[in-house]
Amino acid sequence: KATKDYEDYFKAEDDSARTGSYTDVVNKYYDLATSFYEYGWGESFHFAHRYKWETLRESIVRHEHYLASKLNVKKGDRVLDVGCGVGGPLREISAFTGASVTGLNNNAFQISRGEEMNRRTGRHDHCDFVKADFMNIPKEDKTFDAVYQIEATCHAPDAVGCYSEIFRVLKPGGIFASYEWCLTDEYDEKNPEHRAIRQDILLGNGLPTARTTHEVLGALKQAGFEILEEEDLVKTADIPWYEPIDKDRRWSPFRDFWSFKTTNWGRNMTHYFVLALEKMRIAPKGSVNVSTFLKKGADALVDGGK
């Protein structure tokens, strides 16, 4: 039923029902999709700027280090990770900078997974979690020395409201660093193919809506931020961000064996393995539907990226 309820949110192109129920949309999505993410992608649920000599995992770590280098934090500083997933980036950034990092997440299942990983990796002394909505952060004003988010605030129903909360809990002069999903100037609202791709991206990634780069930058300024630096990382990467999920890509087993899971063969094998587990009642009912809409979302991301 959870799968059907989630998919029902995306039957219409109108974003209003999803933005009005964004907490339910996002929680249902991550309750259903987190285990698939961990299996296929690891502990850091994001794409990365990638050079041709890097594996996907190497690029993900460098991507996180690059963001951390912009925060200007040191040992003893307090940092907030907004929409932290299971905490892969916060553990990496804490280890890289020496800062204490708090992960903000409104999904109980992901927090339980993150806490388990913190204990397993020994990062529990410097990394913690708080279950809360990033539209209403339960922290005092001017609490954190720096704040960052990685492909998370795209889930917010209102960008200005979300960024305003981040601005409120950030100390004066502190840095907010962000990797944000945006629609580019190439998107044409009047093009049916573009709208269909957008809709499948929303479905496959638990997004209530999608914003243009101009809307995101405008929202940051409305929230009180001064834009110190912004760039489209797509333009300087050797390998397109969507390459790891492109079903037509070449797989190099000796260079990056781990990435087989996201090839067309790997995705299909996973899908039919999940089907078998569901038939045997080992996997929960609806698991195949989750696999299906994740594959659909991945293909839409590739089509949109191209």
Image: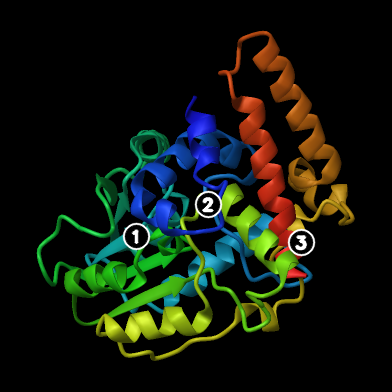
Q: Position of residue 23 (x, y in %)?
A: 34, 47
Name the N-terminal-most of marks 3 and 2. Answer: 2
Name the N-terminal-most of marks 1 and 3. Answer: 1
The reply, left or right, for residue 185 in relation to residue 259 is left
- Identify which residue, 274 or 253, lies in the foreground: 274
Cβ atoms under marks 3 and 2 closer than 8 Å = no
The image shows residue 155, relative to residue 73, as above or below, that is above
- Residue at 49% in and 41% down: 29
Label 1 Cα crowd, 10 Å radius (few <14 / some 14-19 / many 20+): many
**Disc 1: which residue:** 81
Q: Secondary structure at mark 1?
A: strand
- Residue at 26% in and 80% down: 223
Decide if residue 91 is in sight here. Answer: no
Label 3 Cα crowd, 10 Å radius (few <14 / some 14-19 / many 20+): many
Amino acid beneath label 2: Ser
Name the N-terminal-most of marks 1 and 2. Answer: 2
Q: CA distance from mark 1 to mark 3?
A: 26 Å
Q: CA distance from mark 1 to mark 2?
A: 12 Å
Amino acid beneath label 1: Asp
Q: Quadrant of residue 220?
A: bottom left
Q: Position of residue 20 (x, y in %)?
A: 34, 53
- Identify which residue, 23 or 199, lies in the foreground: 199
The reply, left or right, for residue 102 in relation to residue 232 is left
**Disc 2: which residue:** 44
Q: Position of residue 85 (x, y in %)?
A: 43, 48
Q: CA distance from mark 3 to mark 2?
A: 17 Å
- Image quadrant where one finds the C terminus: bottom right
Q: Secondary structure at mark 3?
A: helix
The disc label shown at residue 243, or none: 3
Amino acid beneath label 3: Glu
Decide if residue 80 is in sight here. Answer: yes
The image shows residue 102, relative to residue 50, as above or below, that is above
